[in-house]
């Protein structure tokens, strides 16, 4: 994934932050031990893990009874994402 980041903008190399440094937090968050952690953004970088301050929610979609992946695929970009620049990957560089 980091191959798309220009070399002068990379904060770390893949050797400095291999997937194996991120995977333990992912595995923990998917486990029963983390079942009480909800609605947070978390970060794993190198030898550090933690919580991230979340940006303000400014647009929500609501569906009575909840969402299926198919519902989201059908409605997310056209309704919730309408008028938004949905690909912000270049904003960081």
Image (tube, rainbow, N blue to C red):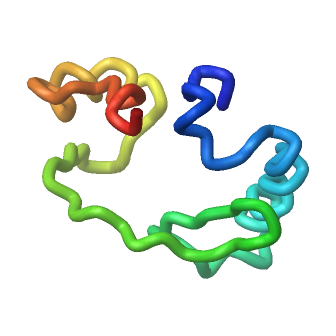
Q: Is residue 70 left or right of residue 57?
A: right
Task: Give 92 or 67, whichever is nearer the viewer.
Answer: 92
At 47% from the left edge and 30% from the top edge, which residue is drawn? 69
Residue farthest to the left, as pictured? 83
Foreground of the two, 26 or 30? 26
- 82 versus 8 height, above or below: above
Where residue 20 appears, x then y in whole percent? 90, 50
> Which residue lies at the image location 39% right of the left edge and 22% below the top edge?
73
Percent coordinates x, y for residue 48 in the rendering: 74, 72
Query: Going by the image, does 59 lie left or right of 53?
Result: left
Measured from the top left, where is residue 25 in percent x and y?
A: 77, 63
Looking at the picture, does residue 54 appear above or below residue 64? below
Quadrant for residue 14, please give it: top right
Write the residue at 62% across / 48% down: 11
| Left or right relative to 26: residue 59 | left
Work out whether residue 26 or residue 2 is closer to the camera in this orientation and state it.
2
- Percent position of residue 76, x then y: 28, 28
User: How many labels were placed on the picture?
Assistant: 0
Question: The N terminus appears in which quarter of the rendering?
Answer: top right
Does 90 sit above or below residue 17? above
**Res. 72 in view:** no
Foreground pick, 1 / 68: 1
Q: Tell me, yes or no, if residue 29 can be seen here.
A: yes
Name the quadrant of the C terminus: top left
Q: What residue do we see at 70% from left, 72% from top?
A: 49
């Amino acid at each position: 994934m980091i191959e798309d980041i220009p070399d002068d903008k990379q904060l770390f190399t893949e050797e400095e932050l291999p997937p194996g440094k991120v995977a333990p937090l992912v595995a923990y968050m998917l486990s029963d031990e983390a079942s009480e952690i909800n609605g947070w953004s978390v970060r794993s970088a190198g030898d550090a893990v933690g919580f991230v301050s979340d940006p303000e929610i400014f647009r929500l979609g609501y569906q009575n009874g909840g969402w299926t992946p198919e519902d989201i695929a059908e409605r997310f970009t056209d309704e919730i994402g309408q008028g938004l620049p949905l690909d912000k990957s270049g904003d960081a560089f």
